[in-house]
Amino acid sequence: MRPAVYITRKLPDSILQHLSGHVHIKMWDKENEPVPQEILQEEIREADGLLCLLTDQVDEKLLSGAPHLKIAANMAVGYNNIDVAAAAKRRIIVTNAPGVLTETTADLTFALLMAAAQRLVESSDFLRAGNWSAWTPMELTGQDIYGATLGIIGMGRIGQALARRAKGFNMRIVYHNRSRKPEVEKELGLDFYTDLYDMLPVCDYVCILVPYTSELHHFIGEKEMNAMKQTAVLINTARGGLVDEEALFTALSTGKLFAAGLDVFEKEPVNPDSPLLSLSNLVTLPHIGSASRATRLKMAKLAADNIIAVLSGKPPLTPV
Ligand code: GLV
Ligand code: GLV
């Protein structure tokens, strides 16, 4: 009998066909609604493999009811939705989708930086609301990007891809990372800061690109925002929990920071009534960092290939 794989969201047909050649698949057949946890708990009882998304909580309780499970393949580079220790205890392999989304996410991060700095969304809204009465010397003026200083927190693949883009804008690039990366520094001309609080005051832009863990909850909070320039722009395209949203609201509404861009939120989807959404100097996106067609297909294919490999007795391609 073919191994059984549960897929937690409707995926494109090409991916399903690819998987069906190797395994028996069952799928939560909705595209924009996560599978309820009770149903997942029920379905996982028979599953040898799980293809899951960042909206699924793969925790101790779920795994304890999965006697056959050999692999949980996350269709994301981040895997903070999975209790990796609980999986390891049961010898369940966890895989993520690194590499394939690096350039797309760096593109989106730079786009968000530009949108926040140049007040693009606010300016578009201004025009459409009929407020454009004349060309005006200081109206809707933003911050320059060319030649400014970019601070990158987290110099992984996406951080490096972002730095390559910033070089094209003649930016000075500084970074903070758990470990120093001398080769990357040399290749991209970066300056390393051991101490985050030494780096923040020199940055015109701060982009956070670290994986989320509970130790990094609210890594950027009031203290960090206070250390930044009043003209600075903060961008988060990693995970919402890294930034203290209440502190960000205060910083943006009191002029302590010039602007921010968020692709991710502490709770997703963000509540449409959230005070954050009332701020004109905050650009908000619905977690679309990897959302090019080609990249999303590559992420799904990589998750599928990890499952096929493990369930046919081969090593996973991208274990966490
Ligand atoms: C998206 O947020 C991912 O982690 O891939
Ligand atoms: C981190 O997840 C990266 O790809 O940089």
Image (cartoon, rainbow, N blue to C red):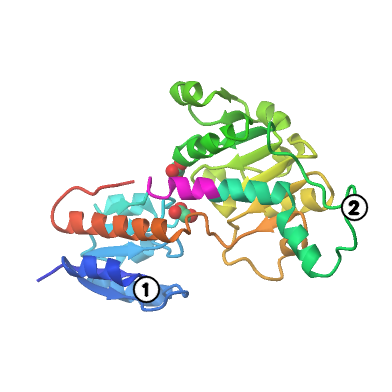
Of labels 1 and 2, the one closer to you? 2
- Which residue has dot 2 on it? 136
- Where residue 176 appears, as percent x and y from the top left, is 57, 30
Circle 1 residues within 10 Å: few <14, some 14–19, many ≥20: some
**Residue 8 colored magenta?**
no
Q: Is residue 193 above or below residue 35?
A: above
Q: Quadrant of residue 9?
A: bottom left
- The amino acid sitting under disc 2 is Thr
- For image coordinates 71% across by 43% down, the residue present is 233
Q: Residue at 13% across / 53% down in the picture?
A: 313
Q: Is residue 276 left or right of residue 216?
A: right
Q: Magenta stretch: give its range.
A: 98-107
Q: Residue 10 has which mark?
A: 1
What secondary structure is found at the residue carrying circle 2?
A: loop
Q: Nearer the viewer, residue 228 or 282?
A: 282
Question: Looking at the picture, how far across and down is residue 252, in whole percent?
Answer: 78, 50
Residue sticking out furthest to the front: 135
Picture coordinates of residue 23 (x, y %)?
18, 68
Quarter where residue 69 is shown: bottom left
